[in-house]
Amino acid sequence: MPPTEDPPAALPIEGHSIGSFLDLLSQLLADERAAEFVILVLTGRYLGRQVSLEALRNRIYNEEDDNVHDALLYQYKVSRDIDSALGIADDICVKNHPISFYVIPKYSGSLKSSVGISHKISVDGIRTQVKLHKIPNSLFAKWGVRNEILIFFPNLYKKGERQSYKVHNDDVALFFENVTRPSLVALMPDMRGANFAPTFAAEMWRSRSETGHLVHSGRILSGEVVSELSGQLRDELAAAIGRGVRLEWAADFFFLHQIRGVKDANAHHPVDAEDAIDRFIEANHLDPGAINDYPDDWYVDVGLELSSATGDDSMAWRADSHTAILRDILQIPEVHAVRMTKIGSSSYAKDPVSHMSEVAGCRITPGVRGRGPLGIVKIQAYHTDKALISDKDGGFLDKLFNVYEDSMAAEVVANARLEVRVPFRMHSRVYDGLEGFNWRRYLVAVPCDDWWTLRLYSLIAYKAVAGSQLSSIPADRTNFSAVTLLMAIVWLTNSLHATPDTGPSSRQLLGAVLPPRPLVGMPEVMMPYRLAGTHPHRDDRVEDEGDDDEDREAANDIVRQPTTRRFPTLYEEEESDDDDEDEGAVAVRTGPSIPFGLVFLREVIWTKNSRIPLFSSAQFSMLKESAFEYFSGMAWGDFVDKIYTGILFQQRSITRTRTNTKQRPVVPEEGEKIPIVFALKNGHKKIPKPEWKGGEIAHGEPEEVEQVSRNEYLSLIYHQLFVDAIALSPSPRGGGGSYTKIAVAHRLKVSVDVFKNQNPGHAFRAAHMRWGTDKDWTIALSHIIPPQGKLKMQSSQNYPQCAYYRMWGHFMSSIRSTTVVKEAREAFVAKFTSEVRWFAWAKAERLWESSGKSYKESTHSPGLQANAPAPWLLIRGGCIWKDDEVWTPTGTELEDSDGSE
């Protein structure tokens, strides 16, 4: 029976400010105590104590400050701007300015996430408010630098359909060919529109690059054409429907105008708000009449930015201020603000800063009843340093580290930013509503160096974990505890600078890696996501009328069921047959938690006995297959296969589907034993001998993997080479059996004896043969048993299917000494050279060549034409071809040897 999990003894807690915590980490780095540094970053554990990060020591407001003169308090600056606008209209409201029209819409430009706005459309004959991002839409055109026009088709909306925003290509094609193209031909002067592609398919063909990728390009339309385009589209649509074209679904289309991310061009003084909005409309070439006529269909994002007066500190939002922000800005009762800012509320998303639970931004999308007198549809509180890492690319850890390091050197500070989305008719009132706030109540101030160093030190630790695994042996890299830690590093890295992912796979991971805590009474500040059961006498369902996005996860509540044990396992454990396992145990419902102010993991160990950091066995928990595949991008078997074969095979940029079956290692029958034929120096030392399943190296816990001597494992590889060579020998094109005579039933019995025999004809029906020089054999053996570091492409024929080749990779990876690997290879080559009289003429890209090419110093089996396809063999002097012999294993009778598969 696996051991039960006793909760670890609680460590004494030591509170730290952000600065003192970083000082402690800095000292460990200076003393070159790398393992302790990594453990402290990951778990908060150091010298038998548990660090608790108290970020609110950096707050800039206390209750007693209300009686202190403002000049004596922390000084900050406030600036205002207009950041964005969204407008719904039946017409295109860009005035006297060209637009760039897209025949092929870029689907990444579709509106597919909530903007806090609903629009009334007809659903089954009833006028219904529907979230705008649920209505099928696509990018129609762009204008200016960052402005877009999207076209919406409400009649395509289907309630409850996931990804309902998509407009399918068939519909796009029908609309372009029958509505958009005729409209442009009619409106553009001098038949300039006639050279649009005649069909959508033709445009798709024209837009393909040499690599097959779509290249989206826009067609510039003049301001005169734009002013008449929407009316012409409706006329052409009506005409097409009249001709019987099935375009009824396109009726009632409308446009969304989006102006995004222009805050720095529209900063202004509070008293200049009205002039600022007028300048904003004019600068973006919007029709002011359309906006003033329908002010409830146009929304503006009013921005407010808070910065340190000295410029020395980064300003950040306190997580405990979110309720107050909502209450004060929306001007709603506190009870409603509390409800809407509960974790799990569909109105609320928390965005922690650098994994701190007490410092976080947020996004709030109140429902209709929670918008307050200003009609605010969205509030976003965030930090301006996000702009530095908004466009990510490859080489992520190194480049991200450089960004953080350079930002600290340049004394880049983050400002606390607030954006409020309101209907246009309320834009002037929202400015008044934001006046008179004491913003200190909601903020902390973090010195610039500390702001970036906290992230830098985190990345150093993450990179150390990843680097230790990359340089370790496969047995360590496939230890599931270590792999789970690596998955945690992926999650931690991504959430260091972005809103943490709390989807199903991330919840599974967090349940496995965060310290468990009893659910009853767990404060929300400690929850990584919504946990049911924290208040057993209270309904845990979050009751609100927020933006209930169907794309959000259906189940917010993941809890760990009553348990008395948690044992390392790859996937779900089977039920125990031990009926007494839980006898006397007290079931406690637990859930993952963040109890110490920073995201700290369960106990991690990294000692001389553990070459890489991994979770303590007593603290390790299971991770489901689906979660593993989400973070690794592959199934567990493929991951293990990649680790063990990565030393031998380079990935190509474009891989093809493998159609050949991988060879499995020979398993001796009972009583049989493959002889040990090597006597390496220190060959008695053990290495893991992994099990195989379906041609893959199977996972097993380290303590379960069989250990064998280096001599024994190298002997297994030597024996396996000859089995694989016959098993993977070529067959004639078009079928007709195999070139080898050896019966299928005997192929697993193949040994070096087949190749010691000077008659290749006892194993093959036909073959081309080259009298191999020493150089020929040396080159062939460099492919057959490559030296360390000599990689082959994974598309190489035969090699990826050879079990011996993968075993050789495991052997090299399991031994750190290049000298030992070199000695082993030299012994292997010497043994092969002394015994083998003939073998496959191995090339760089394939073990077997079976062409009809002509080579010097070659001969052919009797009856085989020189240019006929057949296997090529390297042979040594003394070999003679005899057709009348067939190899069979010792002690067996000759069976049907037609070689058919």
Image (cartoon, rainbow, N blue to C red):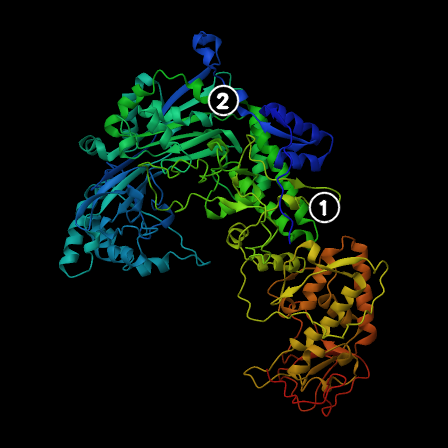
Report crowding for label 2: few under 14, some 14 to 19, many 20 or more residues within 10 A (C-alpha): many
Of the two numbered discs 1 and 2 on the same chain, state the one appearing first in sequence: 2
Closer to us: 789 or 358 = 358
Q: Is residue 130 left or right of residue 870?
A: left
Closer to us: 652 or 124 = 124
152 versus 54 height, above or below = below
Label 2 element class: strand
Checking the image for residue 444, the label placed there is: 2
**Residue kind at label 2, given as amino acid type:** Val
Q: Position of residue 686 (x, y in %)?
A: 78, 58
Q: Position of residue 722 (x, y in %)?
A: 72, 74
- For disc 1, the marked residue is 610
Can see residue 134?
yes
Q: Position of residue 802 (x, y in %)?
A: 66, 69
Quarter placement of the C terminus: bottom right
Q: Quadrant of residue 712?
A: bottom right
**Residue kind at label 1, given as amino acid type:** Ser
- Residue at 35% x, 15% y is 436
Quarter placement of the N terminus: bottom right
611 versus 336 height, above or below = below
Q: Quadrant of residue 451?
A: top right
Distance in Å between CA atoms under marks 1 and 2: 40 Å
